[in-house]
Image (tube, rainbow, N blue to C red):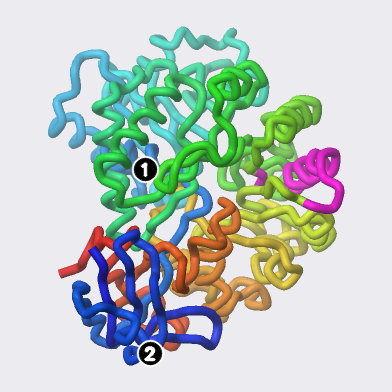
Amino acid sequence: MSTLIYNANIYVERGVFAQALLIGDDGKIAAVGTEEEVRAASNGQETQFDAQGKTIVPGFNDSHQHLFNTGIALAAVRLQGVTSIAEVIERSRRYIEENHPQPGEVIHGMGWNQDYFTDEHRLLTRHDLDKISTEYPIIFDRACGHILTCNTKALEMAGITTETVPNAGGAIDQENGELTGVVRENARSQVRCLMSERSLETKKRLLRTAIKHANETGVTSVQTCDVRLGDWESTLQAYNEVLAETPTLRAYHQFSFMEPKGFQAFLDKGYRTGTGNDFNRIGPLKLFVDGSLGARTAYMRQPYADDPSTRGIATLTEEELDTLVGMAVKNNCGVAIHAIGDAAVENVLNAYDKVCDGTNPLRLGIVHVQITDRPLLERFTKNDILALVQPIFLHYDTGIVEDRVGKELAATSYAFKTLHDLGVHTSFGTDSPVEDMDPIPNLYCAVTRKNLRGEPAGGFHPEECMDIYEAVDAYTIESAYASFDEKVKGRLMKGYLADLVVLSDNIFEVPSDDILKIKVDATMVNGQFVYQRH
């Protein structure tokens, strides 16, 4: 069904706005311009939508997140924003009382962050979780997803003792010869094995929950890391079925296999970057070479300023990284690699140097790119390496980064403006459910360099503030570039997909501190409204 949108403030590109838009039956934009021009191109039979003068932007495209895990997080014990260990315990006990889990069922929670705790400023331990239950196994993932804490029951069921050797690239914490319940990086799978594989119908239900949230927040495309070791074929089937039944979101999979055997099995099934359709397509290989700053597992060149005993954790050796990147390139697959610490970023750039010759046809990229100095940033330009970044991380990280790495290195980190000005293809994502999928706070952090409380005044290293046009483009046309879609997605121009968002206010004119007040009034995917705020 064709649609004519009029009485609008339509963002076309910097300095160019239109008043009307015509969408054809194929879900693509047939005309854009003044209302007179667009009506002249119409047949008069279209559905009419009066935008009431509101601003319309291309649909937001989250260039890195975990959509399926977002669905899981929305159904698990919600630990985002808890401000004390006591609150973790109380909220979890209430969850058990209200949900009546089956005997032996794992109680799973996500989102806690010890830096927000006001009673005791430390990681959760098994002793804390034992106060919730000693009958159920409990596994609580920290907000970053790189540390978990489990209770004594979970350790016992997983067969973990003080003699257990952690997987390479991981750690099982002990203190005074006793397990603390804290498990890091690659060792997490030694506990997470307790979590039974979800049925196809459960996966579909969780995906629908996450997609509904995406629709409500104006996200029309996600580049998502969910196809991983385990029953990945069932996960991909769930995506296929859900997006065929209700095509309200476009998914581009950053599939993750951290060893050659699993990656080869995926390739043997015929999957390559680009396989699929407009709504469900295979993207790049996703690798992890370190952890997170908050957990002090991001891999650093120098020891942490606030913990000189560690430089973090490298989750792949140089040889392992080179092997996997080489396999991907040989098989015409892109690569997107999680790297947060400066040593991790350097290792990835070194690996890419070995497969690039000054060009980057597979659009190899680095996800996060947090701790950097100027020479590292400039190295992105050597082979046109992409940066897939999360400005929303400034909300939390500005409070810890100087303590973790020192003021000098912090000053050249989260350098989104510098990346943009260097000509690096820089796209925005949220890493949901690490942070909420909502693009508005993400844009606010990119433009103001403040946390969501408006601190610090003037912004954290304001020389790295992006302007609102740069930020919106990073969330739309640049994210489209990361998935080879820049000629069909990310702009509201003739021939492009009619994926768009109606905003409550003019995001290009409101004071930057007021960006957080903006709401998504409507979301359209493929020419059909999938959400309208009432």
Judging from the image, what secondary structure is the residue with disc 1 in? helix
Q: CA distance from mark 2 to mark 1?
A: 40 Å
Instruction: Kindly identify which residue carries mark 2.
Output: 34
Residue at the (58%, 19%) spot, across then down? 268
| Image vertical order of residue 356 relative to residue 50, above or below | above
Q: Earlier in the sequence, mark 2 or mark 1?
A: 2
Q: Position of residue 78 (x, y in %)?
A: 30, 43
Q: Which residues are magenta?
A: 339-359
Q: Is residue 75 above or below residue 421?
A: above
Residue 475 vs residue 200: left or right?
Answer: right
Q: How many C-alpha atoms fall within 10 Å of the one at disc 1: few (<14), some, or many (≥20)?
A: many
Q: Secondary structure at mark 2?
A: loop
Residue toward you, 343 or 479 = 479
Q: Amino acid at mark 2?
A: Thr
> 385 left or right of 445?
right
* Residue occupied by mark 1: 70
